[in-house]
Amino acid sequence: MTAHREGRARRSGRPGARLAGRFGGMILVVWGAATVGFFSLRLIPGDPVNVLVGLGNVSQRVRDQIRADWGLVDPLLLQYFHYLGRLLQGDLGTSYRMQQPVAAVIGQQLAPTMQLMGLAISFAVLLAFGSALLGRGRRTGPVAGLLELVAVSSPTFWIGLVLIGVFGFGLGWFPVVATAGFGALVLPAVTLAIPVAGILSQVLRQGLDDAAALPFVDTVRARGASQTRLVLRHTLRHAAANSVTLTGYIVGSLLGGSVLVETVFARPGLGRVALNAIVNRDVPVVLGIIVLAAVSFSLVNLLVDFVADRLDPRLATEQAYA
Amino acid sequence: MSILAAARSRTARTRRVTRMPTPALWVAAGFLLLLLLSALFPRLFTGADAVRTDIDAALLAPGPGHPFGTDQAGRDVFARVIYGSRYSLAIGFGATLIALLAGLVIGSLAGLMRRVGDGVLSRAIEIVMAFPEFLLALIVIAIIGPGEASLLIAVAIAVIPSYARVARVQTLVVKRAGYVEAARTLGVSPAVTVLRHVVPNTLGPLLVMATMGIGTAITAAAGLSFLGLGPKPPIPEWGLILSEGRNFLATAWWIAVFPGIVITATVVSTSVLGRHLQASAAGRQR
């Protein structure tokens, strides 16, 4: 194993340069997202002061004062550079509506969403592996295919409603409203997991089929390995390596789906923060969510590259990065 | 992957294509046709009114006269789904068409341009694709405000990058094809070459994508309007019906269940159709 790892390190050329390149790309994505977000959110019609003061009636003098306080009278480009400067220091600005630092608003709601997404990913992986391993027979294949198609095609929020109706109101197994505790997390996580499981299962089954046609299968068989061992130890590893590249897409769809799932189940979380900020036109919070999404996308992709290298050492050779 | 393995996996895939059940395709196409008819001529399917309230008939379970039951205001859910198909289909088709055209223009430009132009456009596509489509649509709604037209625009903008990326890759492939070379050698002007030879040949994969995309667009639009960012009640848009049904899950499950089944069936049908087109396009290339 160590010899193997050394071999990989030797072949991978200049890992430092590669890492720097990846990191540069990451900065570029975050900067681009922040910039596009900053300027396009200026297109929102209406006066931000209206958002700041809410429904209260204020005089023109107070309005001007507020505008000056929030730096809204500066030239746009100056505002942009101020924003970038603060962003570099990790300051996401202050919410118009909640008069709180955006980082705090997001930070408070990060935990419920991460719990939801984490459990959803676990469910999705379990469901997908189950369906991929069981759905490989002549009879079970079409069934798995149909289930995958329905899972991918059903609107997330509808799945949530059906689950609430059946397991919440009908059978009474899970609480209908969001409460603390694990029980309340199950239905939302399953809801979020189902479409992801559908996609993952499709890719896994295709990967298993493709791997079953590779020459090494004959070698493994010749060694006398059973079918179960062949699939679990060898072809599944191939299939999984392929599906790891989907992680970025999956995290994205979980993040997008959390807006709907949190609304359906009336749960707190980032999705709700995003939705409220969008409805209330709370620009700094929307911008904060945009930056957060870009950062998490980049981090996930960085991680995926790393894991894919591990699963398939060929990818780490210089050739693959040439 | 060795050549042998590649060949094997191709035969495996071909087998899957021929195994594709044609009845499923007929069912899918038939369902989409019915949906199109219900959008154009709702009167063919139901005599009930989709918006007029009738408190005496509130929350009736599905049965004769009301196949999908009635909602809290006594409106026939079946009629609302039928009349709603027009909004969902218009948004689904409209958004997909806009995304397809915009993606084609952006992607072809990127594919045809030299290094710098291509680099800038590709980078821009990459940055926008860092966002989950649904979040992107939400951000667009934040800028242009909620409403029916916003829904269409938001869903379209959210998927433009995917189309642009495919169009760019396709253009890069077609650009090097023999017939483009031949056209150039024959002295056909660059503009004509692009419009008559490059663009039409990039369209195939985009159309397959768009077929499947209609379903995704319908779901996304329903999701946005479920959140209250689309049309306002009492418009019988599918997502809106679902969000109204949400409050009656314990007593009247049918309000939320039936429209959801119709949405799912629509998306499944567009996927089946799209996969078939994809398979037959792949078969033709071989």
Image (cartoon, coloured by chain):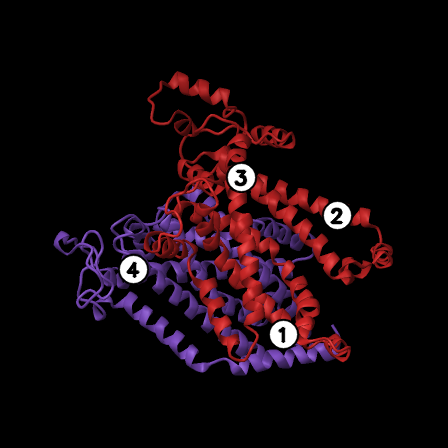
Chain colours: A red, B purple
* Residue of label 2: A21
Vertical position of residue B1 compared to residue B100: above or below? below
What label does residue A209 carry, if any? 1
Chain where mark 2 sits: A
Label disc, if present, on residue A13 of the rendered structure = none
Q: Report the Cα–Cα distance between label 1 and label 3.
A: 39 Å
Label 3 in the same subunit as label 2: yes
Chain-order first, disc 1 or disc 3: 3
Do marks 4 and 1 share a subunit? no
Residue behind mark 3: A111
Disc 3 is placed on an element classified as helix
Quadrant where the C terminus of chain A is found in the figure: bottom right
| Residue type at numbered disc 4 | Gly
| Residue B33 image point, x, y percent | 34, 73
Residue at the disc numbered 4: B84
Q: Residues within 10 Å of mark 1 (few under 14, many from 20)?
A: some
Mark 1 secondary-structure assignment:
helix
